[in-house]
Image (cartoon, coloured by chain):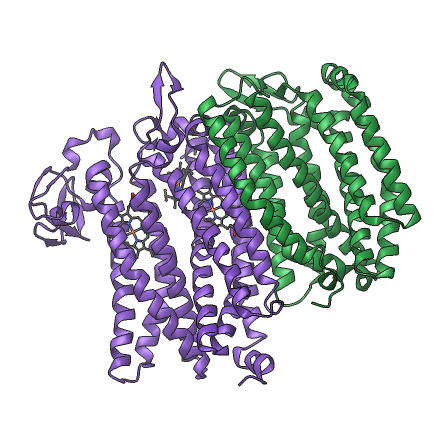
Amino acid sequence: MELDSVSLSRMLTTMTLAFHIIFATIGVGVPVMISIAEWIGIRKNDAHYTLLARRWARGFTITVAVGVVTGTCIGLQLSMLWPSFMRIAGKVISLPLFMETFAFFFEAIFLGIYLYTWDRFKKPLYHWLISIPVILGSSASAVFITCVNAFMNTPQGFKLKDGAIVNIEPFRAMFNPAAPSKIFHVLTSSYMTAAFILASIAAAAIIRGKKSTYYYKSLKLSLAMGLLFSLATALAGDESAKFLAEKQPEKLAAAEWHFETGKGADLVLFGSLAGGHRVENAIRIPKMLSFLAGGSLNTKVTGLDKIPDDEQPPLWIHYMFDLMVSIGMFGIGISALYFILLKFGKSFCAKWLLCLIIASGPLSMIAVELGWILAEVGRQPWILRGYMKVAEGATKADNVGLTFVMFFLLYLVLGVMSVYVLIKMFRNKPAEEEFASRYSRVS
Amino acid sequence: MRLQILGIVVLWIFLYGYLIVASVDFGAGFFAYYGKLTNKDHIINHIISRYLSPVWEVTNVFFVFFFVGLVGFFPETAYYYGTALLIPGSIALILLAIRGSFYAFGNYGPKSNRFYLFLYGATGLLIPASLSTALTISEGGFLKKNGDSVQFLTGELFRSPYSWSVVLLAIVSVLFISASFLTYYAGRAKDGGAMELLRNFALFWSFPTIIASLLVFLSLREHNPKHFQNSLEIWWMFAFSFLFFLAAVYLIYKRKLLGTAFILVMLQFFFAFFGYGASHLPYILYPYITVYSAYTSDTMGITLVTVFIAGLALLVPSLILLMRLFLFNADYVRGQK
Ligand code: HDD
Ligand code: HEM
Ligand code: HEM
């Protein structure tokens, strides 16, 4: 099969975003965790938490660097790979993109200050205060970029007249119907992912035989935050589903294998398709889809029969959806279980539990990827829903294949290097040693 | 002032900001590697890393700001440049990505490594060279419109004397700007050895920048006579630039007022850069797009400018804080904090 520049552009965009989103998610979530740990350290006057914040921040410098460079790549690639789309979209939705750079600017400045001033202030509280603008900056950039993505799903704030764009309303375009639920879900899922990744790291250290209180405190704090944020993620995910039912029914219908419009729709979990629309081997929960979509067992849910054939998203996103939701449930379950066992004084460092906790971090990151694939592929064939199809937006340049190979190699090197550097960084300086050398006078 | 002009001026200011801060960074990479090769790294490298560590990310944002703003104000440019720059743009991006991440790997990571330093030094020269092609292309003659698509004439670019003189100017300016800033910074750190070494670099690279600028002018006359004529009309901008250059070199030579000397260097480039920009107008890309034809709507233009002003109110105090903590804090510079 000969790949045309449309497919290649899609592949390259997918690859860059899928890689960037790993670091972006960490970039949004981890500052929150760092700030919480430092705050507890100050409040309880417990140097363990301060060291936790310090070590997390040190690892964070590596992931931020990769986030920044891959983000710069995606920013320029949007213009290079989707010039026709950016020419149109640029006129209407450049406002949040522009605001995003301010958010980055703000974050970058205070992150520089935060990382290099640990011991420069007389009061530790002043140093903690600097983490606030870092959080504001990174979360705001997630908010703004999500507005752009929401616009692609529910464009508004302009009129098309003879092929020209008129009556532009930048704020209406930015605050489009898809934005609120999407922003809520993106933020909570980033916080959740960061919490579980840090929990995984602590659990992995404990299972390797490091039994100092430092790691137990780290595990407990991360899992507490993980529980909180995974509940919030599920709530936000439910909001997203309700939004889809109302404004973007074809995405929900494809994700749920809901083929015929009707009331009292069943929820289909997993399963497989046997020729056309016959679902086999699935778990069916009666009327649950109606309940999820509208809060009542009798809500009418639009099915794929109402959507023209050439505007239906691929049906395989069903699996993305089910896996994402399963991981969400797993996150809630595992963190809740930990605290229940803790309450009953059970040996909460049981190996099987630690193993499951180790899995929670990578699984959450997988859920983020699955969620984005669901959201983006579920928008197919549109790049700007109702206005422009993906094929019309792509570049006409040759050589996209060559660029794909170059960027593939780049991400490979960056990915391998960042894992290698992070592992070395912490192996060379175990927490117990660092604690002893830094706080020997305190403890 | 018309909104189109206001927009391009704002963007140009940011590109100028990038030019200065990125040059310091790019050149520092080269000097650091050079220092390692000649075993003088103990003299200058700690100066360089103390300055660079807290600010490299901010440098990158200047660049992002410029291109996001350009697409916002002038969406049409995305179409032309986007198609044409796929290959050169991707190469510049990959170099930037390698530079940024390996800087972090080397600096925060295990320990400094010769290979990282090599990458850091080499990309410091290659990136300005590749980014400068975007300006070269804007002079026209390197793109061809084929019906619906835009074609980039790579061969023309490689054969053009103008294009090579711009590359040369980009590289020597980077080294000159960087050396004159680091001389000042070493002076503040009261590090005599480093200051002498960096001062020599600054003096060494000073006259080549002027020679390279002259070459650019001469080849521009052949390549784009219209732009050349326009620039003669504002000859005084370039004359000022030259005077600031002479004054700066004099001060550096005399080892006096190094801070002022660096400000003079900034003014030198300010006048040259804005002289170049002003005579380029109204074209963004000869002969296809001007600031008027590529402009977004007035509603969006006004909104962007408003947001920009609000954003500045937030950023300027933060930037001042950053500079006070790291750049103008004598204890920090001297390595006592
Ligand atoms: C840690 C990651 C994570 C977890 C556990 C979940 N999600 Fe999610 N989901 C995302 C991470 C994510 C995401 C990456 O953030 C997406 C991609 C696009 C978006 O808006 O958020 C997303 C998209 C997304 C969408 C599509 C939104 C749209 O296209 O507009 C729906 C309907 C849900 N999610 C629903 C859920 C439900 C009901 C969950 C139950 C627990 C759930 N998600 C867990
Ligand atoms: C929801 C998805 C995304 C999130 C949460 C996100 C978040 C982030 C974060 C946290 C960073 C690091 C910034 C810093 O620390 O300074 C970053 C970098 C960046 N992102 Fe993303 N991003 C997302 C998707 C995108 C997309 C689709 C684009 C393209 C328009 C993009 C453009 C950028 C750019 C240009 C940078 C580099 C900014 C700099 O130089 O500091 N991001 N992103
Ligand atoms: C800002 C403008 C954006 C543009 C122009 C854009 C464009 C696209 C396009 C054209 C595709 C290919 C569709 C396909 O292959 O099916 C895609 C896929 C994807 N996008 Fe977006 N997107 C944007 C925002 C975002 C954001 C904010 C994210 C979050 C990080 C994101 C995540 C993804 C992912 C993960 C895929 C892969 C889906 C797949 O596997 O096909 N996108 N995007």
Query: Where is residue B73 drawn, in percent x and y?
Result: 52, 28
Q: Quadrant of the N terminus of chain B?
A: top right
Residue pictured at 80% horizontal, 52% vertical: B184
Of all residues, the one furthest to the right in this rendering is B254
Determine which quarter of the picture holds residue B291. Answer: top right
Q: Is residue A83 visible?
A: no
- Percent of width and height locating residue B102: 62, 55
Left/right placement of residue A388 relative to residue A397 reads left
Which chain is drawn using purple?
Answer: A
Q: Position of residue B209 (x, y in %)?
A: 83, 36
Relative horizontal placement of residue A322, taking residue A398 as reference (left or right): left
Residue B215 pos. (x, y %) = 82, 27
Rendering quarter of residue B188: bottom right
Relative to A290, residue A380 above or below: above
Q: Colour of chain B?
A: green
* Quadrant in the picture for the C terminus of chain B: bottom right
Q: Is residue B112 left or right of residue A289?
A: right
